Image: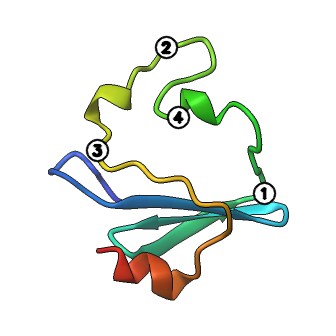
Amino acid sequence: MRSLADGWHHVAAVASGNVTAFYVDGAYVGESAVVISTGINVLGNDSNGGNAMSPTLDDMRVYSRALSAAEITALQ
């Protein structure tokens, strides 16, 4: 597993169909068979407001479509 504790990283989650793919610094790191389509207002938290990560998020974006791997790499 890749550690993100050593500084700032670009993290992307791309939901398409019934899979969410995850990228760290433009590199694919895995996927989940879970897609969340509601509650995006709690990104960086759990739905109860705990586990606050949101103060450390910067330049957050939400797109209306799934980005390709090439598009995610280009965001670096």
Q: Is 13 drawn above or below residue 73 in the view shown?
A: above
Identify the mark nearer the N-term, 3 or 2: 2
The residue that mark 3 highlights is 58
Q: Secondary structure at mark 2?
A: loop
- Callouts 2 and 4 close, C-beta under 8 Å: no
The kind of residue tagged 2 is: Gly
Q: Which mark is residue 50?
A: 2
Q: Which mark is residue 43?
A: 4
The span from disc 4 to disc 1 (Cα, nearest Å) is 18 Å
Q: Residues within 10 Å of mark 2 (few under 14, many from 20)?
A: few
- Callouts 4 and 1 close, C-beta under 8 Å: no
The span from disc 3 to disc 1 (Cα, nearest Å) is 26 Å
Q: Residue 38 vs residue 46: left or right? A: right
Of residues 4 and 8, which is closer to you in this image? 8
- Callouts 3 and 2 close, C-beta under 8 Å: no
**Residue at coordinates 32% horizontally, 50% vertically from top-left?**
59
The span from disc 3 to disc 2 (Cα, nearest Å) is 19 Å
The span from disc 1 to disc 2 (Cα, nearest Å) is 24 Å
Q: Which mark is residue 33?
A: 1
Identify the mark nearer the N-term, 2 or 4: 4
The span from disc 4 to disc 3 (Cα, nearest Å) is 12 Å
Q: Secondary structure at mark 4?
A: loop
**Image quarter of residue 64:** bottom right
Q: Nearer the viewer, mark 3 or mark 1?
A: 3
